[in-house]
Image: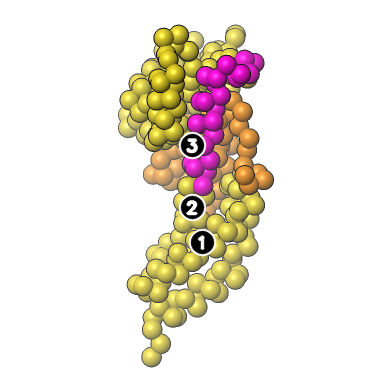
Chain colours: A yellow, B orange
Amino acid sequence: MAKPSKAIERELAEFVAVEGPALCKALSRRFPSLRDEVEDLFQTAVEQTLQKVRAKAFRPRAGWAAWLRRVAEHRALERLRSWERRTFVRLAASSTSPASDASSTSAAAAPVDPNRGPQREVLEDERRGRQGVLLSEILKQFARYCEASARRLPMKEAYERGLRGQRPAEIAAALGVDRNQVDLWLKRARDWVLERVRQEDVDRSVFLTLHRVKPE
Amino acid sequence: MPAHLPQLDSFGEVVRWVIEELGALCPAADRLRAYAARPDDPSLRDVRYHVQEAGCRRCRDELEALGHPQR
């Protein structure tokens, strides 16, 4: 009698043959930065799933589409987080170098400490390289913090609107509240993020860019 | 560097990218499911903004997978 895992393997192979292209297309839409790698990511997801099937006769309760999509998304997010980390270190280094472009980083440049000698510079560079927490993680933590209390949900919306480019007056109009309330929410959000930035040792220039005030 | 990974040249661009592509401000899964069931619920106003007005691709795909495609 054939092993149960063999039957499941065949089921998976048939599913991939029929639905694989559509899933890859959906992944390309979801992660446009990775559209050249989507097939590799999907193939990795299939191989990992196959290992589980062979080891434990695994069959996902939510169905193959949902399972493979989740696994492929995890792989894609890992790839993007690695890119985010490298980008962040590059930008942090360039924003404190004398040759940095003032027009592109003027609002984001980290304040330069005139008392910082060469040894301190080396230590700073090492610190940035070791940086463990990403901006994406801090913002996610902020979202979860707001969702934990109904009172904080308007602050989440106001902050997201601000990060997406809306000015405080526009946010106030959209939320049907007065401008002072929006200013208060944005200040609280910024303070929360800044505190987390301090705790996690993320470069302060992230904060400065996040909270660049748009002229009214 | 793979061809389509963005060359992000300012922290502002990084912020926009992590929101759009890494889903940094996406609602928690249970709130998105609640929105699928009750899109007009006042307590899900922030989710409505995120999905309808900001047009988050990730959340719209997720809602479609839940059987609630967004216009």
Q: Are discs 1 and 2 less than 8 Å apart at CB? A: yes
Identified at 58% across, 22% down, the residue is A165
Start-end of magenta stretch: A79-103
Is residue A83 visible from the viewing direction of this image? yes
A55 drawn magenta:
no
Q: Nearer the viewer, residue A122 or B6?
A: A122
Q: Nearer the viewer, residue B18 or A105?
A: A105
Is residue A29 visible from the viewing direction of this image? no
Tag 1, which secondary structure? helix
**Mark 2, residue position:** A75
Same subunit: marks 1 and 2? yes
Q: Nearer the viewer, residue A60 or A81?
A: A81
Q: Amino acid at mark 2?
A: Arg
**Mark 3, residue position:** A85
For marks 3 and 2, give the CA distance: 16 Å
Mark 1 Cα-neighbour bin, 10 Å: few <14, some 14–19, many ≥20: some
Q: Position of residue A121 (x, y in %)?
A: 44, 21
Identified at 59% across, 64% down, the residue is A20
Q: Amino acid at mark 1?
A: Thr
